[in-house]
Structure formats: C-alpha cells, structure tokens
Amino acid sequence: MLMSANEYRESLRSYKPSVYLNGQLVQSVADEPGFAPGINAIGVTYDYALREEFKPLMLATEQSSGKTVNRLLHINQSAGDLLNKLEAVRLLCQETGCAQRYLSHDALNAIYQVAAQIDDAKGTTENSAKFLAYLHEVQERDLTLGIAMTDAKGDRSKRPHQQANLDSYVHVVERNAKGIVISGTKAIVTGAPYVHELLVMPGRNMTAADAAFAVCCAVPIDAPGITMVARPAGRPGEKAAIFSNRYGQSTAVVMFDNVFVPWEKVFFADEWEHSGTLTHSYATHHRHSCIGARAGFGDLLIGAGALMCEANGFNPADESHLREQMVELIKITEGFYACGVAASVYATQDPLSKSFMPDAVYSNIGKLLLATQIYDMQRIAHYVSGGLIVALPGPDEDHNPATAANLADVLRANPAIPYDKRIETARFIEDLTASYQGGWYSVISLHGGGSPEAMKREIYRNYPIGDKVALVERLLNRGVLANASSPAEIEAERPITQNTQAGKCCDQGCTVPGTAIMVDLPQTIKKSGE
Ligand SMILES: Cc1cc2nc3c(=O)[nH]c(=O)nc-3n(C[C@H](O)[C@H](O)[C@H](O)COP(=O)(O)OP(=O)(O)OC[C@H]3O[C@@H](n4cnc5c(N)ncnc54)[C@H](O)[C@@H]3O)c2cc1C
C-alpha cells in the first residue's frame, strides 16, 4: 500500500535503531531535528506518488504481481521505464536537492539481475523466487531501503582478505541452518537512520580468497548488532540555510557486529563470482539515476542564477557575458542529462532476468561529466551572483531595528526587486554552492556512485573500440582477400591491431545506431513553461 510522507515518517517509529548523532544516542529518529531535512526529502517521494499529475512518472505496474508500485521500487521492463525513472528522479531532486530513495531502485534492479544469473549458473529458480518474494514485500509495504555497499575498505591497495582489520569490509563470520552472521563496516550509507532496511552489497569484484566478503542481504535498520554513527541531514536549524534546513541528506557509518540474517533475506553469501556483475549492474543503474538527480540540482541553479541576475539589475538576455554564463550552465546540465536520455534509449534487455539496463557507456559518461562539471556549475552561480552571497549580513540582522531599514535601502539593487527578495535569492545560492552544503553537493557529485576513475574504466571496458578499428581497417582495404590461402597472404590479412574489444555488455557492443529498443513510450510530464 502506498504511503504518504506523514505515514512514512510515522512508520519509522516502529524501528528502534541504535544511532548516534553528534555524540548523542538518538531516542527517536522520527522526532530528531537533525534528521528532519532528510526525512522531508524522502517524504516527497511518497507524496508525489499520490499526486494525480505526477502519477504517470511516479507510479509503475510491477509486471510480476500486476500491482501499482512507487517508481523507485520498480523493476524496469523497458527503455521507456528507464526514461520515466530518469525524469522522476530529476523532478524529485528539483524539489529536494537529493531525494535519496532512488538508491533503493538501483539496488533492487541490480539484485534482480544477479539473482537470475545465480539461478542460471546453478540450474535453479530458487534465488529469483526468493528475491521476488522480498521485492513484493518491499513494494507492498512501500519501504525505503538504504544501500550499504561502500565498505570502510582499510588500506586501498589491498584486497579485503589482506586487510589488517578484517572488519574493514563486511563479511560472513558464521553460517548455520537458519542463516548467516555478518560483521564489518560500511563507511558511507545515505539516509541510513531513517530508512526501513539496509541492502548490504559487496562494493567490488571479489576473488575466491575474498569469498567471505561476497555477501548480499537485507537487514532491518534495528537488527541487533547494528550501530550507526550519523551526520545531520543538510543544515537543520540554521536560519540562513533557506533550502537545506528543509531538505538534506544524512550519511552514516554503519557497523555490523555479529548481525544475524535469516536465509530468506540472504541473496548470496560466499558466491564471489557474482560480485562483479552486482557492482557493475548497480553502478550502471545508480549512475543513470545520479544524472537525473544532478540535473534537478542544475535546474535549481539555473533558476536561482537568473533570479540573481535580475535582482542585481540585469536581464541576461541583454547582457552578453551573463547570458554566456547562463548558457554554459544550461549546456552543462542538459549535456549530461542528454547522456541519461541516451542511456535510456539505448537500454539493453538483460538476457537472463529480462529486465532492462541503461546503456553503460552513456550512463558512465553522464556521471563522469557531472562529477567534474559540478564545480563549473557552482562557479557560474558565483560568477553571476557577485560576492554578496557569502558577505551578506546574517538573518538576525533582518529584524534588527538599528540596521535593518538602512541595509534594505543600501543593499537594494534592481529598484523593481525588494531587498528581502534579493537577499533571499543570495542566501539560496550560498546555501547550495558556498556553504557546507555547497561543498557536500560537490563531493557527492564527484565520489557518490563511484569516483571518476571507476567511470573511466567502465567506459573503456564497455566501449566497442574494436568495431571502430574494424571500420578503419575496412576503409584501409585490410582483410579484403576473404579466401587468402598462402602463408604470405594469410600474414598480410592478419589484423595488426590488438584493439578488437567489441564491448563487454553484449556481443555487438553498446551503441549500435538504429537498435535502440523503446518498448514503451515514456509518459513524461510536461515541464513547466511548455
Ligand atoms: C555524500 C555521499 C553519499 C554516499 N552514499 C552512499 C551510499 O548510500 N551507499 C554506499 O554504499 N556508498 C555511498 N557513497 C560512497 C561512494 O560510493 C564512495 O565515496 C565512492 O565509491 C569512493 O569511495 P571512497 O569514498 O571510499 O573513496 P576512496 O576509495 O578512498 O577513493 C579516493 C581516491 O583513491 C582512488 N582509489 C581508491 N582505491 C584505489 C585503488 N585500489 N587503486 C587506485 N586508485 C584507488 C579513487 O579513485 C579516488 O580517486 C556515498 C558517498 C558520498 C560522498
């Protein structure tokens, strides 16, 4: 049953997680002011699913049950589904900065695919059936799942089993007839204190020696043995933080100390061969979602940048250097978003699970673009705004009888824009680009979903360079003697290049023009102004 934001907040009361915030044990997550902006942001994913105008984007029909579910808990059945998810994430993140719950979607889709792969390897249907039962429960209860993938990792140059402290990675310490027992640390888990369950997943490819670290399972956040050490979500209670005292994101270090997980919630344990597929699949889905999320953030900067120009007395349409900056901001935002659209259009159907995956090359290029261009986006917001965004008197001066009237007079710019509207916009831009929260948006864009090097490897690994090499060899008339027979002829026809990579995601390579599969047309919502 779909919940509202209020029902979601209330549902958190039935969990009693062990959470520390700023050195204090949190008595009630639902009532903790330090988490309120995070709960508000996830709440929007619930309320939007109940709003008539957003239903085409925010709801989907689960094929395996026929039930209507939140888009962020849905398994993609078409390229159109992926495009709708991308649009839904952008819509949600325009409103909240980061709606967080799309991580649930990304992990559910990844585990769904891996369950089918494990079944195929073992000749059973058991794993898919087990995961489907879990998926239906999550959808029915309209849960939010935190993704516990990034281990503490210890010495980065060593593999999990080589770490001096084995708890640097979550691992299986015991298996028995009822389930497994896990210990270790996941270092960065978005929203952990105020989700319902955690999906524990390996964060890297594993080897046989790392089998104990190849574990994927679901645990409620208050399972005995789990301790979380969290940061506040956004900038709660700060008057100047006019956006991020309302919406933000907490992260937590999650420590597992002999946590029991029953077999029905264990999706794999020790099956190290499948960790690579899981991380690849999750990363591809997640980077695709990150594109939508950061495009929503771009929308906020574009709107605020235009408002700030106006408050300063300029129309960017008439002032060419400001227009140039605004166009640059639009180009960056829509440029990486276009990669998300392309990744949806060139989606491929997973041969085993039959669900749909965004194209890996475009997903990774889009995420790579936003990871570095976030700094350009913030620079542009600073450029068009002026220094006032960090130099403004604080909110307490707004009502100071000794200064308020004078400030309102001397700090007004465009006579048509009241002073309070000008400083409101300036504080909005400071909050999103030049405060602690501004830095947070930079770092989540750079490292969230994997650091840039991870994307570069995926792009190279999946890109069909071999196809392009073959193209050029053909144009150079190499290999024209189809029936070469003498050793000299065979030698002359042998391709010189070792670059025969055809793309790892499928036999043909990732981006074969004209083969996009759009089973469903996306039911996109008209954007405002259209
Ligand atoms: C705000 C935020 C929210 C996040 N939310 C989640 C979440 O909900 N769930 C989750 O699981 N994760 C989450 N992450 C974690 C994110 O996926 C990681 O930050 C990212 O994968 C990088 O890992 P790291 O932070 O440990 O950095 P590191 O791995 O320490 O990387 C630092 C640098 O070292 C390089 N490096 C690391 N290892 C190697 C190596 N072996 N060889 C060569 N170079 C190397 C990296 O490329 C990078 O440049 C979140 C991150 C942020 C910032």
Image (spheres, rainbow, N blue to C red):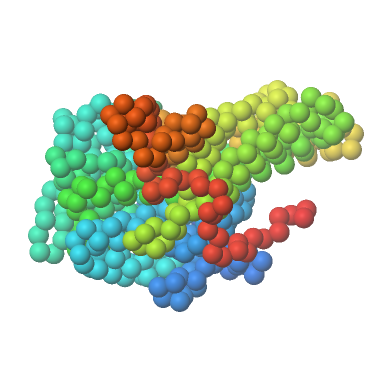
Work out which residue is located at the far bottom of the displayed protein and give it: 66
- Please tell me whether residue 366 is drawn above or below residue 56 in the rendered image: above
Rendered location of residue 432, percent (x, y): 61, 36
User: In the drawing, does residue 47 fall left or right of residue 131?
Assistant: right
Q: Residue at x 31, y 35 (%)?
A: 485
- Please tell me whether residue 199 is drawn above or below residue 64 in the rendered image: above
Rendered location of residue 72, percent (x, y): 48, 59
- Please tell me whether residue 382 is drawn above or below residue 55 in the rendered image: above
Rendered location of residue 47, percent (x, y): 57, 63
User: In the drawing, does residue 109 fall left or right of residue 335?
Assistant: left
Given residues 314 and 283, the one toward you in this image is 283
Q: Quadrant of ligand 1?
A: top left
User: In the drawing, does residue 381 fall left or right of residue 282?
Assistant: right
Q: Residue at x 52, y 51 (%)?
A: 346
Q: How many numbered circles does the render carry?
A: 0
User: In the drawing, does residue 65 fall left or right of residue 156?
Assistant: right
Q: Residue at x 45, y 55 (%)?
A: 348
Given residues 530 and 96, the one toward you in this image is 530
Q: Residue at x 64, y 70 (%)?
A: 52
Would you identify the image quadrant in which residue 312 lies? top right
Work out which residue is located at the far right of the displayed protein and give it: 415
Please say whether residue 256 is visible from this viewpoint.
no
Identify the image quadrant of the C terminus: bottom right
Rendered location of residue 317, percent (x, y): 84, 34
Work out which residue is located at the far front of the displayed protein and give it: 486
- Please tell me whether residue 88 is drawn above or below residue 166 in the rendered image: below
Please say whether residue 154 is visible from this viewpoint.
yes
